[in-house]
Image: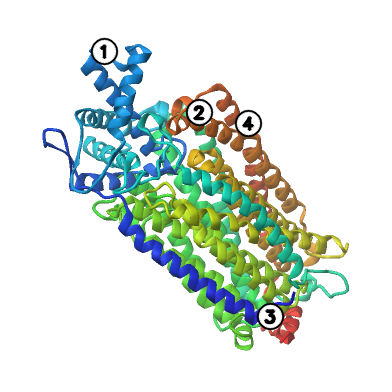
Amino acid sequence: MELRRKTIAIVIVIAFVFNLVVMGAGAFFAYQEAPPIPEQITGPDGQTVVTEEEIRDGKEQFQQHGLMNHGSILGNGAYYGVDYTADTLDLKTAHMRDYYARERFDVGYESLPSDRQAAIAEVVKQDLDSGYDGGDIEYSPAERYAHEQIQEVYVERYHEGSSERGIPSEMIDSEAGARQFADFALWTAWFSHTDRPDGENSYTNEWPYAPGAGNDATGSAMLWSVIAMVLLVAGAGFAIWLYKSVDLPEPSATDISVPEPGDVSVFPSQRSALRFIPIAAVLFLGQVLLGGLLAHFYIERDAFFGIGELLGFDILQWLPFAIAKTWHIDLGILWIAVTWLGAGLFLPPLLTGHEPDRQSTLVDGLLGAIVVVTVGGMAGIWLGANGHLPGELWWLLGNEGLEYLEVGKVWQFGLLAGFLIWAALSVRGLKPLLDREPPYGLAHMILYAGGSIALLFTAGFLFTPETNIAVTEFWRWWVVHMWVEGAFEFFIVAIVGLTLVSMNLLSRRSAEKAVMLQALLVMGTGVIGVSHHYWWIGMPDMWIPIGSVFSTLELIPLVFILYEALGQYRAMTETGSFPYKLPFMFIVASGVWNFVGAGVLGFFINLPLINYYEHGTYLTVGHAHAAMFGAFGFLALGMVAYMLQIAIEPERWDASWLRASFWLWNVGLALMVFVSVLPVGFLQLDAAFTESYALSRSLAFYNQDVVQTLFWARLPGDTLLILGTVVYVADLLRKRFVLRSSADDPSVDDMAVARGVLDDD
């Protein structure tokens, strides 16, 4: 089946408009259907218990002090601490039971015989299983009692501190702030058990699973899980048929002239782009070291092998889990992004033989700006979380406190500006190609992919700390999910296509067609696929069928990427003289891990019925690590290998250390995910299904002997990942002294690749 590039381009535009209409309508409904924040919550005597302002202030406390990277809200955030929604709902149920037991029998609930416990439990369940028709919320006497008790629990836990939970003293710096945070968490618990007006389910579609409060999986979750499984089989078959039917050329190294690294000159702007690599490597090393610390915190929650006690250093106060995890996440995003940006600026001269005036200086300037934003953002996180930034500066310059979007708004704006500057520099470098090709050409695809990353980032500017948490989460997932399942996947296929062309393994026209078709599949499924994140956060239940369908269809482009990886592997092995085997090893690994992490693990946890119980457990951790580092990280490292091989004299090129890192990373990631992380996740799934979600996230669950053993079992995998990164950084230091000098006056004739690319019209 022959597809023309222009036809695919038209379908991409149609898909883009369709996505815009669906998600635009979703944004409208997000504001209309978000759980209401009442003007006040009153007790049975009409006395005010909580005001709207206190709930909103509680959300600010939650964000400012980094509580989303200690525990989670509505299942989103870190899994080290409790989920605040499930925890307050569980505590509310327990305290209400105790209230009724003492009121009726003058003893605590646990002291009652089983028949009376059952009767009290049913009373509490009926108390909580209520609807809401607007106006103020009126508590029953038992609810008011429970609210007051939970406030004191949260003051003791999050203001006074709890070393056994890994919570430093004054994590929230005032008792009033801790009570406001409890008010906010209790409000999310309220709308998790309260039915929508004229509805049969709560605002969160009965999440979390809490049988004592009457929360259980809905029929819709079961129905659409079955439909999704049928779609999985059909979608996988369709993807394989489409791949076999569409006439897409595969890379081949036989009977072609692959340019040797020594056949091309290094332009000044490429030497500048190479400077992105050591900066990214330092960020990468910091990320994996913090990852090791975070893993150990699950075993020793207030220490690190006794080193702090030996040195008189309280690690819990200076580097608690919340800040370490914030840095770990942000450094992970940054080192991959910095590497991609460097690669995007390194490749244009290979393809065009064109070096714009002062391009090298401008590339250096962009790198300097990235360093300033990175240092400022990381410092701001610590300063903001520790209360050192007054007024509104805590979220403008400090810690906005939302997972993956932690850095302050000013630094986020700096990152957005960096993407736009990168796009402008890429346009300058690719201009000879842009002038000669149609709007759907390969150079345009790179710009569209990079531009989409910047465009989606703007959704992060559509909310403030005062915005309703459900609406905040709606926009946050626009950025996070549409990056990883849309824009990042688009960038992967575009950058791989560009690399194959630069290696002379594909013609430019062939690469354009392949990239466009995969981009169509990615954008056609991944964008609306964000809706599976809306199932339990207070959005309407219309997202369950939409999210089920499109999350399942996300498998189709991943099947394409897997087949492409296998094709690249064949191209790498069909000739013994192919010079770029090491970069190809990373690219193939990226495709395989993308299929495993995003495809296999992603599909499993995104079945609605499974997700209802596993949402916010270690199964998500396994999915995230395999997809983020396995797919995006390995691609970035493959580009590093390619850039370095071109930039070093062939006779001085030594791939042994980098190859060692490749295997250390792959084996380490596999051990971490399959030996430790996923087994813990399955135990959590079992605990959530048989007991309650709150129990699966409790300290009692994590402190079980079998779970602690599995946490220790993560040590070999983490050690290999850290060792691989140390070897990588050391290798970069070695290679720094053998880089080739850039050409004084480069031209197209200095680029064996560029001559062929520009002639392919």
Q: Nearer the viewer, residue 626 or 691?
A: 691
Query: What secondary structure is marked by label 4?
Result: loop
Residue at the spot 27% in from the left edge and 38% down from the top edge: 173
Q: Residue at (63%, 56%) from the top-left corner?
A: 555
Q: Secondary structure at mark 3?
A: loop
N-terminal of the two: label 1 or label 2? 1
Q: Label 3 is placed on what type of residue?
A: Arg
On the image, which quarter does residue 26 sit in?
bottom left
> Residue 709: percent from the left, percent from the top?
59, 26
According to the image, label 1 marks what residue? 107
| Of 567 and 531, the residue lying toward us | 531
Label 4 – label 3 distance at C-alpha: 52 Å
Give the residue at mark 2.
Answer: 690
Q: Amino acid at mark 2?
A: Thr
Which label is found at residue 4?
Answer: 3
Q: Nearer the viewer, mark 4 or mark 3?
A: 3
CA gap between label 3 and label 1 equals 78 Å
Precedes in sequence: disc 4 or disc 3: 3
Q: Is residue 565 visible?
A: yes
